[in-house]
Structure formats: structure tokens, C-alpha cells
Image (cartoon, rainbow, N blue to C red):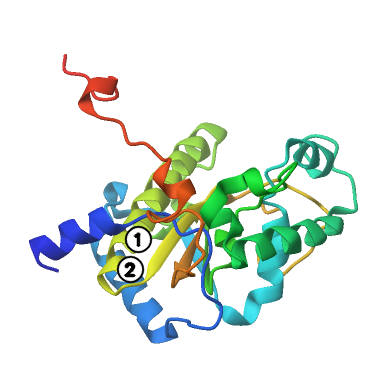
């Protein structure tokens, strides 16, 4: 990747919130992106403490189960999250997901934002991507040191977990930039609830999860792209916003 390609990939990247389901990158292309990310990701001491599981198009129904656990409605999150009430019956959210997805497919959300709903029940539909990557904490996945060589005390595990999150974030960003080089769109999702009753083949309340990432091609009605109302409303800080400070 030459300098201009790298800069353009950085500049063009954004989080794609809805993907085409009938135009899908090849598995070989996804493997190329992942392979290249392994070569360039900076990881502390080259000790990898995270793992990436990839779920392709054949997991479409399981992804819908995962998606209902990304519900944004506060009442539903409180009702079905194990860390709060954790009630059974979360499957009722599939109906809300269908309503939300229909509003996406018809362009309503892209053009008018979430105001199309009287009381919006929104979801992080980026987890419906043709290729869903699940990043999880897995100590000593790669490196010279092995788990059995380390004293697994609580303090050490906390430090390893912290480094796992750093490595996962670095690799996910590398994947996103490399994906743009191949005209593949990407997204991140770290907003989800726990629920004991929502059994599926992708993620069933494994508390080692770090985040999800989607790969595929942006749907024309993606509501978080630079050409959508929702996307245009997003702001970036400048040096005047005191995010970066000189001391």
C-alpha cells in the first residue's frame, strides 16, 4: 500500500451500519485482509491475548439473534440484561428488529434519521454483516511465553486482559484500513447486553467478549455513511476542542 492509498483508506473509513446481503466479498478476500492485518498490528511484546472468530454468511439467523442483544431502547436493555432484571422473552425483539430493518431498507432511516419512529427501538445492525468477527479475551494465543509459564493471579490476569483489549482494538482498526484498500466496508460494535435465554452459535453470554466487527459491502440505505443524514450529523473534534493539549 503506497502512502496515498494508506491515507485514502484512513480518510474513507467509517462505520457501516447496514450491509448488502446479496453482494458478498469472497472468503479468500476476507482471508487476505485478515492475513495482512496480522502482519501490521502492533501488539505489546508480540504476545497476543485475543482471538478472532469469523462467522460467514451461513450464520445469518444466528446474527439476528446476536442483533437483538444490541437493542438500544433503555427499557428493553434493563428488562433483558442479566446485569439488571435479565428476564426471559427476549425473542419478542425480533419483531422490533424486523420493523427497524424495514425502515432501513426503504430508506426512511437514512433520509430522516430515527425520527421516523414515535418511540424508536433501534439495533446495531452492523452485526448482520456477511462476515462477523468476534474478538474475545484468550490469554497467550500467540507468542513465546505460554499460559502455563505464568502465575495466573488476579492482578496478572487484569493486566493481560487490558493488553488483550489494546491488541484487539489495534487489529480491528488495521483490518478496517486494509479492508478499504480492497473496497470492503467495515464496522465496530461494542454495545450489547447479556441474556441467558438467547442461545445461538455465535455468542451466548461469554463474558470474555471484547467487541464485534463487521465486514462486507455497504447497502445503499446504510444510515451511518457520509451521505446519510445520520452520518452528516457526526462531528469530529479539532485542536480548538481541547481534546489534544500541549503541555
Relative to 215, does residue 158 appear above or below in the rendering?
above
Q: Estimate the x, y position of residue 166 in percent, counting from the top left.
A: 39, 44
- How far separated are the C-alphas under marks 1 and 2? 5 Å
Q: Is residue 246 visible?
A: yes
Q: Is residue 228 left or right of residue 57?
A: left
Q: Residue at x 53, y 63 (%)?
A: 18
Relative to 13, does residue 63 appear above or below in the rendering?
below
Instruction: Point out the image quarter for the N terminus.
Output: bottom left
The residue indicated by pointer 1 is: 176
Q: Estimate the x, y position of residue 137 in percent, counting from the top left.
A: 52, 52
Q: Residue at x 42, y 63 (%)?
A: 186
Q: Is residue 4 left or right of residue 26?
A: left
Q: Is residue 138 visible?
A: no
Q: Is residue 215 left or right of residue 193?
A: left
Q: Quadrant of residue 241?
A: top left
Q: Quadrant of residue 162?
A: top left
Q: Secondary structure at mark 2?
A: helix
Q: Estimate the x, y position of residue 53 in percent, counting from the top left.
A: 53, 68
Contact, mark 1 vs mark 2 (Cβ under 8 Å): yes
Front residue of this view, candidates 171 and 230: 230
Q: Residue at x 42, y 52 (%)?
A: 168
The residue indicated by pointer 2 is: 179
Front residue of this view, candidates 204 and 66: 66
Amino acid at each position: 500500500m503506497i502512502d496515498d492509498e494508506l491515507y485514502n483508506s484512513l480518510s474513507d473509513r467509517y462505520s457501516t451500519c447496514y450491509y448488502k446481503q446479496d453482494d458478498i466479498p469472497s472468503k479468500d478476500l476476507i482471508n487476505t485482509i485478515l492475513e495482512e492485518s496480522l502482519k501490521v498490528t502492533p501488539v505489546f511484546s508480540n504476545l497476543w491475548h485475543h482471538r478472532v472468530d469469523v462467522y460467514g454468511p451461513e450464520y445469518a439467523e444466528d446474527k439476528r439473534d446476536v442483533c437483538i442483544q444490541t437493542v438500544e431502547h433503555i427499557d428493553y436493555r434493563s428488562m433483558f440484561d442479566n446485569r439488571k432484571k435479565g428476564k426471559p422473552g427476549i425473542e419478542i425483539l425480533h419483531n422490533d428488529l424486523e420493523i427497524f430493518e424495514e425502515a432501513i431498507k426503504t430508506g426512511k432511516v437514512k433520509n430522516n434519521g430515527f425520527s421516523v419512529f414515535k418511540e424508536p427501538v433501534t439495533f446495531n445492525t452492523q452485526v448482520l454483516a456477511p462476515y462477523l468477527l468476534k474478538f474475545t479475551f484468550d490469554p497467550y494465543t500467540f507468542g513465546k511465553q505460554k499460559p502455563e509459564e505464568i502465575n495466573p493471579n488476579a492482578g496478572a490476569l487484569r493486566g493481560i486482559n487490558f493488553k488483550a483489549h489494546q491488541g484487539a482494538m489495534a487489529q480491528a482498526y488495521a483490518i478496517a484500513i486494509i479492508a478499504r484498500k480492497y473496497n470492503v466496508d467495515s464496522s465496530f460494535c461494542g454495545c450489547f447486553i447479556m441474556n441467558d435465554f438467547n442461545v445461538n452459535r455465535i455468542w451466548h453470554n461469554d463474558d470474555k467478549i471484547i467487541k464485534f466487527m463487521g465486514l462486507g459491502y455497504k447497502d445503499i440505505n446504510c444510515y451511518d455513511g457520509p451521505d446519510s443524514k445520520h452520518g452528516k450529523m457526526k462531528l469530529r473534534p479539532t485542536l480548538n476542542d481541547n481534546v489534544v493539549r500541549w503541555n
